[in-house]
Amino acid sequence: MNDRSALLPPHLAAEGTRRRILEGAVRLFATQGFHGSSMRELAKVVELQASALYVHFPSKEHVLAELVRAGHEAHQQAIRAAMLEAGTDPVAQLSALVRVNVRLHATHPHLAIVVNSEMGALSPDLAAPGLALRKQSAALLLEVVERGVARGDFSARHTGVVVAAIGAMGLRVPYWYSPQSGPNIDELVETHVELALRMVGAKP
Amino acid sequence: MNDRSALLPPHLAAEGTRRRILEGAVRLFATQGFHGSSMRELAKVVELQASALYVHFPSKEHVLAELVRAGHEAHQQAIRAAMLEAGTDPVAQLSALVRVNVRLHATHPHLAIVVNSEMGALSPDLAAPGLALRKQSAALLLEVVERGVARGDFSARHTGVVVAAIGAMGLRVPYWYSPQSGPNIDELVETHVELALRMVGAKP
DNA sequence: GTCTATACTATGATAGAC
DNA sequence: GTCTATCATAGTATAGAC
């Protein structure tokens, strides 16, 4: 987790105070958790009175919901773009998915942590859209791997476990990676691509 | 996460009401988080009044601390036993570490989730012992992999990233795995061993 | 849009009877 | 060891002035 990395994806539709609130919230929620952060704390970070927050968001939960929504949207958009460029080769498709997933998690660690760790604090209604996108991404990764196995490009046997493991290593990146004390982001990404290809048993 | 799996490791030194409190707490903290659970909720789960909890633990934080302590101790004990049986072969050592790590996470999912997700809620004093054990386990895994590379058994290049990825896939197991809807635990464990060996580029 | 003031509730924790 | 009753504080959220 690096303090200088982008807090929010660049295309997030929020400006001025609303954006500053979201930036404060993503840092607070990532480090202390949603339930471990209060509206008063958030107000202090953004240099407002707590009551002023309610002009921009109807509740604390809606602040989290907006972060989770933005995170999932950025993720889905990145995946979609990557897949369009990847062609039909399973090796290229898997590489593209891992590449974009790890890069996003490494460049937006706070948001990734909030999306991954704090989504359970949302009511079912507010969590549903994110869960749907998540399911979709997982299914896409599984399809790519199973198609690779069917074509003979990959040799993995328990594809469900392999896909979970590939997802896991990307998911955990924001919890340990720092561009200061490790490889740069390009090396991190390409190492993960190489790992994923080994995990599915891609023909060398 | 499976409701019927063991909530606490069998050797935990707690009986009677104290143990029931810890069992209720590990379920509550795993599903709602430490800050998302109240002492009144915990009391209701254990069928006590909230004030009775303070006879057994001086504070809510100490309940969490005891869970975290027990989790780390069980983990370290299991790793130690596995390494003693593994001999000097890096392949056998890495296999043993992954095997025991994944098995523990799969058989005690609630405790694993609490240890991994809620430790940040502890004050530095109460978190320190756990952090030390964690660092030790991570260092051991890194040593095994680097020794394997030095001996020519493994071919991995960025060992730090590879070790983080191997740890990540084990860490995430309790968040997705269910013995009902997937492979049994033995298959899960052996699949992870195979994945880890592929990740480090073990000679076939 | 932001402020001050405040309502209302939930929370961690304690006191004292049994 | 557990109960009822209670305290003190912190929490989310609202009202109304500017």
Image (tube, coloured by chain):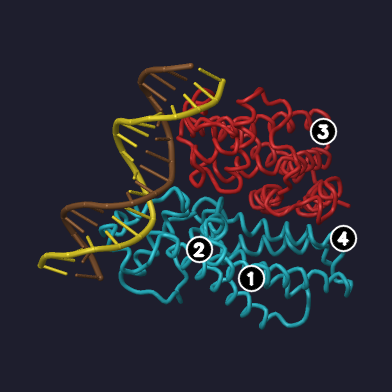
Chain colours: A red, B cyan, C yellow, D brown
Say left or right for B7 vs A113. Answer: left
Q: Is residue A31 above or below residue B200?
A: above
Identified by mark 2, the residue type is His
Residue B132 is tagged as 1
Mark closest to the chain's N terminus, 1 or 4: 1
Disc 2: CA contacts within 10 A as few (<14), some (14-19) or many (>=20): many
Residue B157 is tagged as 4
Label 1 to label 2: alpha-carbon separation: 21 Å
Label 4 to label 3: alpha-carbon separation: 29 Å
Which mark is nearer the camera, 1 or 3?
A: 1
Identified by mark 3, the residue type is Thr
Measured from the top left, where is residue A91 in percent x and y? 82, 42
Which mark is nearer the camera, 4 or 3?
A: 4
Specify whether disc 3 shares its chain with disc 2: no
Identified by mark 1, the residue type is Ala
Disc 4: CA contacts within 10 A as few (<14), some (14-19) or many (>=20): few
Residue B25 sits in quarter: bottom left
Mark 1 — on which chain does it sit? Answer: B
Dots 2 and 4: beta carbons under 8 Å? Answer: no
Seen at 88% across and 73% down, the residue is B150
Which mark is nearer the camera, 1 or 4?
A: 1
Say left or right for B155 vs B140. Answer: right
